[in-house]
Amino acid sequence: MTAQLIDGNALSRQLRADVTARVTALKARGITPGLAVILVGENAASQVYVRNKVKACEDTGMHSVLERWPATMTEAALLARVDALNADPTIHGILVQLPLPAHIEAQKVIEAISPAKDVDGFHIASAGALMTGMPGFWPCTPYGCMKMLESIGYELKGKHAVVIGRSNIVGKPMALMLLQQNATVTICHSGTPDLKAMTLQADVIVAAVGKRNVLTADMVRPGAVVIDVGMNRNDEGKLCGDVDFEGVRQVAGWITPVPGGVGPMTITMLMVNTLESAERLVA
């Protein structure tokens, strides 16, 4: 068996075409969805991510504002910028690119963003809404993973899903989203004594720990769906995920590649969240 690929690039193009059409419809009603991105410091990876987010806004017809600030920016100054953007009616989504310099408390900044503009889905109000099944913004990466499962017509009800990783950004919200679809969910992490025993029971595995080869072929049940959220570099410096792709693809039924899998979906779901924030104004 060779696993079928879940192509994140192709699915992203499809979803972004829908976003573009909805943006056009909103513009006809006098509203242009707007995303503000704040970048503090010179982190090279963050600069790439921010550039891709701004380009995605332009490609879908949205309005974007990119604010670049030096690493010496004070926490108070950053909070003041967030407050100003909260009050800006042309901005429907606010994203503060992480990581922030060490002297700035990231959670304090995240909590300063209005929940109505928290398109990253990191605010405690967004987390609470997800926990209780109320409307709110879902974190973009696990939201993208759910769209990938939906794209292959995968029925999660009654399936056993194993999430490797417990971060607030991916692992925990991923587990809650799967639970909402009536999957039985197990969360594994560094304290799990026998990861292989857990993953061999899984119909769906989501690997999200940022560690190469955390999932190998002997850990996967034949036919399982494997979603690789990891972003790492191999010994040759090439981008790779958390999954031993070449080995696991010989066992799994479906698998996401790295690159070209979950990555494009994260930015696409950011566009969806920003659009939906603007659409709420005319709902």
Image: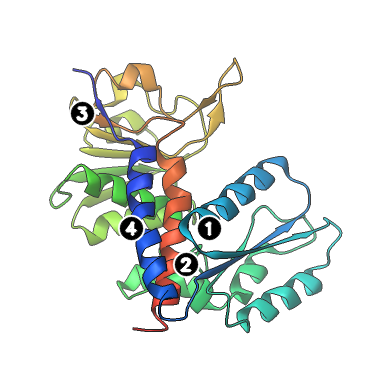
Q: Which mark is residue 274?
A: 2
- Mark 4, residue position: 18
Precedes in sequence: disc 4 or disc 2: 4
| Residue at the (67%, 52%) spot, across then down | 99
Q: Residues within 10 Å of mark 4 (few under 14, many from 20)?
A: some
- Mark 1, residue position: 57
- Mark 3, residue position: 253
For mark 3, give the secondary structure. Answer: loop
The colour scheme used to paint the residues is rainbow
| Residue at the (63%, 48%) spot, across then down | 51
Question: Mark 1 to mark 3: distance in Å?
Answer: 34 Å
Q: Amino acid at mark 3?
A: Gly
Precedes in sequence: disc 3 or disc 4: 4
Q: Mark 3 touching mark 4, by CB under 8 A?
A: no
Question: Mark 3 to mark 2: distance in Å?
Answer: 33 Å
Farthest residue in the front direction? 28
Q: Quadrant of the C terminus?
A: bottom left
Q: Mark 2 touching mark 1, by CB under 8 A?
A: yes
